[in-house]
Structure formats: C-alpha cells, structure tokens
Amino acid sequence: MTPPSMSGGSGTAVVQAPRVEGAYPEGHLFLARQKHGVWRVALDSDADFGVLADTAPMMSAAERRTFGTSAVGLASGNQLTAASDYRTGMRLPFALGQDWILRGGPHGFAGTDTPYTAIDLKGGDQRVLAAAAGTAYTICSSGKGWVRVYHAPLYSGGPRLATDYYHLVGNPAFNGQHVDEGAFLGNTGTDTSCGGEASSRHVHFSLGTYGTSPNPPSDRTKIAIAGHAFGGWVIRSGATAYEGYALHGSARCTANGDGGATCMHNYGKLALDQGIVDANGGSSVTRRTGPGDGYASAGTAADGGTVTVSCTGTGTSHTGRWGTTTLWDRLSDGTWMPDAFLYTGVNGPIKPAC
C-alpha cells in the first residue's frame, strides 16, 4: 500500500479471497498522515488508529467519536464488568419479530480458520439491517457486497465491537456515515466482489473488534462469536465449522444449511441490565422474596423470558447451564432469582450489591 501524495489520507485496504466456498477476504480501514516527510499509517485494528483519528482532517466529528482516543461509552453510571464480557447490546441483523434460518453455525471468516467469528443467516424478507447503531463503511472497492459497522462501546472502557455483513446485493455505498440500529444495509445475496463463494443467498454476519492491538497485526482483531447474544439468542459452537446452534433460554435453533428451520426469531437487543431466563431444560425458574431457597416463593420466571436486574446479593448455590454460583439477582419487580439460571453475558454481577 503506497501512502497518498498529500499530508493525509484514508480508505480501505482489502486482500481478496480465492473464489471458493468458505473463503472470505481480509479488509481494513486505514489512516495515513505525513509529518516532516515521515508517513504514519494505522489500520482499524491498531490502537494507533485512534490517535490518528483524533486529528485526521478527513474524519468527521461522528467518526472521531467512534474511533478517537476520547471515545466514551453509550451508557453512564456503574457498569460492572468481569474478566469475560460477552455483552453486545445487539439485535439479529434483520427485522424485529421475523424468523430466519440459521444456515451456518459459527465458522471462521475464511471458513475453517479460528476463532469462529461468524454465522450465516437467510430467509424472512431478505433485508439485512444493522445489528446496532454505528459508523458504516463499504469495504470492497467496488462498493458492493461487504459492509462493516463500527459500534461505540456499550460503556466507558468496554470492548469496541464491529460487525461485518458479506454477500449483500443492493447495498448502499457507505463511507463513514452514521447508521441507526435497524438501518438498511442491503439484501441477502451471493455477491463475492472481494472473493469467496456463496451457493445460495444469505448474509455472512461476523463479529470483531477494532482499535485494540498495540502493534499492527496481520489481520483485523477477531473474536469468537460463540457466547455472545444477538436478538435474544446465545450463539454456541459445534464440533466443526458451520455446525453449532443458538439458544433462547432452553430453546435451541440448530444450524442446518439451506433446509434448516426458520427458528431464529428476532426478539431484539439485550440491555446492559437485562438477562435471558435459562431454566436449563425446564419451563420456568422460581422467583423468591429474598436471595435464597429459604425465602417464600413469589411466582416463576418463564424460560426464555427477559428480566431486568436492579441489584444483586448472595444466597443458596445453584448450578445452571452457565456454571455454579451463589449469586442472586433482585429483579425490577422486587423478586429474586438465582443468577445460575440467567444469561447476562457476564460471569458475575451486572449490577452492584443491594
């Protein structure tokens, strides 16, 4: 890549993939600045990208808020985190209330490579929508097929996530525009403008991070999509690429290729203070008047339901799908339930102690 013959520049750099099934291209945004005859270049995956974004004249104010070193989270207040934070605040990339096919379970951006960053989705009205608000770019130089959206952190210091949408047809050309959650990005298709192959129309939906690596890596920083929730579904890997499934509470949607069931219902995003009830095979979880089995029953929470957590405490130990813990969550209605039966995306409390 040769820097432009001026004081600064920006654009996309793409390594095209071979045109075979399961292959996907590598793409980056880049910024370049010249000072005293010395060029400084950073990719979107590089921590230095934010430093350049702070003063790059070609970057809009909205882009600086996304990429700059002073970027802040969307939520304020005490946002508790744990060593592993799988919260996305994202819906599935199609209309709320629709049911789509999980065509392919977790797989790499190039198919069998790891980590498994992506899933394949198809069906419904075929309209692919932004999973969350962010700053959008068309990655392929042709302006077709591949859109990436960079999302602001959910909270100050939180992970900087980006979502990719590939194989699109009829997509708008984006160059740093802000898009709202649910904005139209294109239709499912078989486009391979930057390489790869697709035997039937779908969207290759993948997850990554940006602005995190201290040194320029050979590829955009990638993270496994498994364990993260989109539209009320927790993605789970299978034994090999393209296998796997998604969980909504105890309900399972299995990846079955083009003939799969239309079971991926888009329930919408999960807020930072919310969780999905997972009875681990049961139909409901008992709610109680306090944090422990010794307190009186206060009804039940249905498997797959969404609840809001107001604060936390400790009580009787329980083992659920996500592990064993003495943590209990006080819900917004004043009742309590074991955290072992609640998917929140965090292995620990999401709210302070009561």
Image (cartoon, helix red, strand yellow):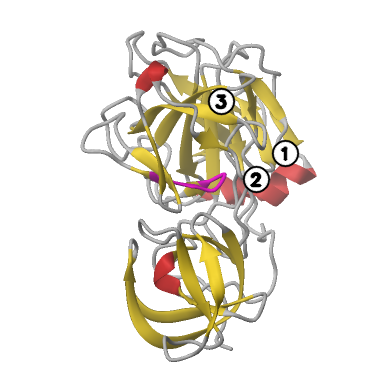
In the shown orientation, is residue 49 left or right of residue 282?
Answer: right
The part of the chain drawn in magenta is 230-235
Looking at the image, the residue that sits furthest to the left is 239
Tell me the distance, in whole angstroms, between the alpha carbons under discs 3 and 2. Answer: 15 Å
Q: Earlier in the sequence, mark 1 or mark 2?
A: 2
Question: Does the residue at mark 1 contact the one at mark 2 (Cβ under 8 Å)?
Answer: yes
Residue 287 pos. (x, y %): 52, 76
User: If the image is split into quadrants, where does the C terminus sit?
Assistant: bottom right
In 3D space, how far apart are the residues under numbered discs 3 and 1 (Cα atoms)? Answer: 14 Å
How packed is label 2: few (under 14 Cα within 10 Å), some, or many (20 or more)? many
Q: Is residue 106 magenta?
A: no
Question: Front-most of 155 and 188?
Answer: 188
Mark 2 = which residue?
53
> In this view of the protein, which residue sits in the foreground, 94 or 78?
94
- The kind of residue on which mark 3 rests is Thr
- SS for dot 1: loop
Using the numbered discs, state the Cα–Cα distance from disc 1 to disc 2 in whole angstroms. 7 Å
Question: Is residue 22 among what the camera can see?
Answer: yes
Q: Mark 1 highlights which residue? A: 59
From this view, report whether residue 310 is shown above or below residue 230: below
